[in-house]
Structure formats: C-alpha cells, structure tokens
C-alpha cells in the first residue's frame, strides 16, 4: 500500500536492423550502404493544441492572477504603512505625555 507506483517508460525497445545478405552470384562491391539513424519513438502523451478560445481563457486567467496578486501586495503595503503611521503617532503622544509629566513636578 505504501510502495510507490512508477508509470511505465515512454521508450519503445530498439529493434536491430537485419544484416544485409550477400548472394554468391553477384560480385562484391565496395560501395558503403548508408546508415539510417534510428528515429525517436512516438510519444503516447496527448498533444496540447491551443484554440482561440483556450488562448483567450489563458490570457484572461493570467490577467486575473496578476490583478489578484497585485491587489494583495498593495493591501499588504498599505497595512504596513498604516501601522507605521499609527506607531509614530503613538510615539509622539507618549513623548508629549512624558514631557508634560516631567514639567508639572
């Protein structure tokens, strides 16, 4: 149950090319035979095709993600700015109270 299950590999087994046969009635020639490179096996994965509708959906989705992330970042920056201003105001008020308490003695 807890052992991993790996998907099968996408490569097909390589089949060796048959050796050329030489008949006894034909004279031997020294012309080399061209070597044909083995082509890559066809993948069984589905190909993603973009239609105009799916392209429009991708652009719309990307725009929505950018707008949402931008709004979150701006709101976080605004929260930090408001917190900083409120802490500064509290510091000024406390300094004023401490100064007034020292002057009344």
Image (cartoon, helix red, strand yellow):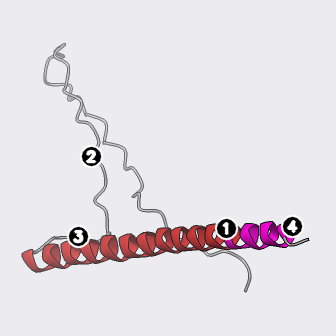
Answer with mark 4 or mark 2, whichever residue precedes in sequence: 2
What is the quadrant of residue 22 in the picture?
Answer: top left
Q: Residue 63 at what x, y percent from top left?
A: 25, 72
Depth check: 42 or 76 in front? 76
Q: Is residue 34 left or right of residue 87?
A: left
Q: Nearer the viewer, mark 3 or mark 4?
A: 4
Q: Which residue is mark 4?
A: 102
Answer with mark 3 or mark 2, whichever residue precedes in sequence: 2
Q: Nearer the viewer, mark 3 or mark 1?
A: 1
| Residue density around tag 3, few if under 14, some if 14–19, many if 20 or more, within 10 Å | few
Which residue is situated farthest in the left direction here? Answer: 52
Q: Which residue is mark 2?
A: 39
C-alpha gap between disc 4 and disc 1: 15 Å
Q: Nearer the viewer, mark 3 or mark 2?
A: 3
What is the magenta range?
93-103
Q: Which residue is drawn at the image coordinates 19% and 13% (left, top)?
A: 30
Q: Which residue is mark 3?
A: 48
Q: Considering the numbered disc 4 on the image, is that residue within a helix, a strand or a loop?
A: helix
Answer with mark 2 or mark 1, whichever residue precedes in sequence: 2
Q: Are marks 4 and 1 in contact (CB under 8 Å)?
A: no
Q: Is residue 86 left or right of residue 38?
A: right
Q: Which residue is mark 1?
A: 92
What is the quadrant of residue 3 in the picture?
Answer: bottom right
Which residue is situated farthest in the bottom direction here? Answer: 1
Q: Nearer the viewer, mark 2 or mark 1?
A: 1
Q: Is residue 21 above or below residue 40?
A: above
Q: Which residue is drawn at the image coordinates 52% and 75% (left, top)?
A: 79
Q: Which residue is drawn at the image coordinates 79% and 71% (left, top)?
A: 100
Q: Residue 9 at what x, y percent from top left?
A: 47, 63
The C terminus - image quarter = bottom right
């Amino acid at each position: 149950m807890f052992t991993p299950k790996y998907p099968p590999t996408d490569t097909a087994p390589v089949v060796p090319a048959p050796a050329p046969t030489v008949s006894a009635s034909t004279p031997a020639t020294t012309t080399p035979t061209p070597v044909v490179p083995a082509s890559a096996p066809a993948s069984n994965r589905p190909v993603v095709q973009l239609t105009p509708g799916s392209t429009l959906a991708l652009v719309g989705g990307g725009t929505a993600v950018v707008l949402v992330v931008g709004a979150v970042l701006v709101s976080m920056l605004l929260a930090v700015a408001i917190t900083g201003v409120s802490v500064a105001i509290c510091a000024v008020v406390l300094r004023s109270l401490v100064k007034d308490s020292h002057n009344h003695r």
